[in-house]
Amino acid sequence: MIVEVQNLCYHYKRSSGNIEVLDNVDFTLEQGEFVAIMGPSGSGKSTFLHILGCLLKPVSGSYRLNNEEIADLDEKRLAEIRSCQIGHVFQMFYLLPGVDVSSNVSLPLMYGNIHKKEVQRRVQRAVQQVGLVDRLSHNPAELSGGEMQRVAIARVLAQNPELILADEPTGNLDRKNSNEVLRLFRRMNQQGHTIILVTHDPEVAGYAKKQMILDNGSLRRA
C-alpha cells in the first residue's frame, strides 16, 4: 500500500469562521493503481492532492505514505519525499521560458546527487516516452499547449517517482491534445506508474481504472 489516509480533515481559517474542506476522509492506494477523483470546482480536490503531495499538512487524521506518517516529519524529510517519491503534473505547465526542453526536463534532477551522464540518460528516455525527441532544443514558446504538457510529464518521468499526482492536467488543452495527454497517462500506468488524477470532467476521469467523487468534504466511489 503506497497511500493510507484515515479520518483526514482540513479546513481554511477565516475571520468569519473555519471553512471545512475535507471531513473524515478515508482513502487507500495500492501500487500500480490509476485513480481519478472528480468533483465540482471548490470541492477540495486540489487541497486533497496537495496534502497527498506533502505540500499541505492535514488539520487532523492520518496520512501515511509508504508507511511513514507525514504529520510526524520535519521539513527536511518532507522535501526529500517531494523530490524523490512524488511527481506533480499541474494544469499550468510551469516550464522555464528561457531554456529548452532538455533543460526543463532535467531541472528537478539538478537538486539530487545524480551523475551528469545519468541525468542525460533519464532525460533522453523520458522525452522519448512522451514523443518529443525532435523538440529537445526547442523553448516552450515554440511548443503547442499539448507539447508543453508532455514536457511537464517528461520532467516527472525523469524523476521516476513512486506516485504521480495530476491536478487538472488537461484543463488548458483542447480536446485533441487532452486525449493525447490522457492516453499518455494510461500508457504510463500500464508501464507500472501509480497515478492520481483530479478533474471535474467525467470524460477525463474515464481514462482512469477507478473513479471517485469528492464533494461536501467526503470521498466516495463513483
Image (tube, helix red, strand yellow):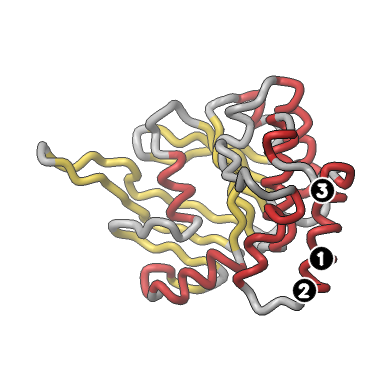
Name which residue type carries label 2.
Lys
The location of residue 212, given as percent across then percent down, is: 55, 37
Tag 3: amino acid:
Leu
Q: Is residue 173 above or below residue 190?
A: above
Q: Secondary structure at mark 1?
A: helix
The disc placed on residue 116 is 2
Q: Is residue 155 left or right of residue 70?
A: right
State the image quarter where residue 17 is shown. top left
Where does label 1 land, which residue? 120
Circle 2 packing at 10 Å, graded few (<14), some (14-19), many (20+), is: few
SS class, disc 3: loop
Asked whether disc 3 touches disc 1, contact meaning CB atoms under 8 Å apart, the reply is no
The numbered mark, 3 or 1, whose residue comes first in the sequence reads 1
Residue drawn 27% across the image and 46% down it: 11
Give the amino acid type for the residue marked by disc 1 in the picture: Gln
| Label 1–label 2 contact, CB within 8 A | yes
**Spot occupied by residue 75 in the image (x, y as percentages of width and height):** 40, 72
